[in-house]
Image (spheres, rainbow, N blue to C red):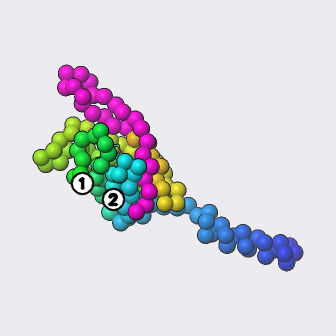
Amino acid sequence: MRYFDAWLLSGLVLLCSATCHAQSIQPNTRWVNQRGSILTITSIGADGQIGGSFVNHAKKFACKDDAYPINGWTDGQKISFSVRWKIVGHDCNSITAWVGYMTGAQITTEWTLVYVADSSHAPAILRESDIFKSQ
Ligand code: BTN
């Protein structure tokens, strides 16, 4: 290998070690989505299990402004977490599950909300997306 080729290769290796490495979601991080809701990840176990809280600030939804526990998983940049919208004194009779991935300072997700609109009918399902930015 000529000197220039070796120099170029080591430059590329250095650049890639700074930018090409797989990113992983970290504990003690706060994320805000486009609806103003706040996801706080407080713990990530050795097995990737995550804990934290979610404060819903989305318009047209209930169970707002209180912290609800989250349960979920990470594996590198991939994440899933869910919220049961039930705490002492407040029950929205619904559950949301998000699945997505982190790129840089953003987590892109799709979510599914199962809720009871009318107790004489089967629960309903709503699917949309949320984008969280690191705060
Ligand atoms: C409910 O209204 O049944 C409970 C609150 C649901 C809030 C949803 S969860 C998905 C979407 N993203 C948010 O930040 N809030 C809404």
Residue 134 is covered by the magenta coloring: yes
Residue 22 is labelled as none
Residue flagged by tag 2: what amino acid is it? Thr
Highlighted magenta segment, given as a residue range: 112-135
**Badges 1 and 2: C-beta atoms under 8 Å apart?**
yes
In the image, is 67 to the left or to the right of 135? left
**13 vs 116: above or below:** below
Which residue position is annotated with label 1? 67
Quick check: can you spot residue 9? yes
Which residue position is annotated with label 2? 40
Q: Residues within 10 Å of mark 1 (few under 14, many from 20)?
A: some
Q: Position of residue 84 (x, y in %)?
A: 26, 44
Q: Position of residue 48 (x, y in %)?
A: 40, 58
Q: Position of residue 93 (x, y in %)?
A: 21, 37
Residue at x 37%, y 38% (from the top left corner)? 112
Q: Residue furthest top?
A: 120
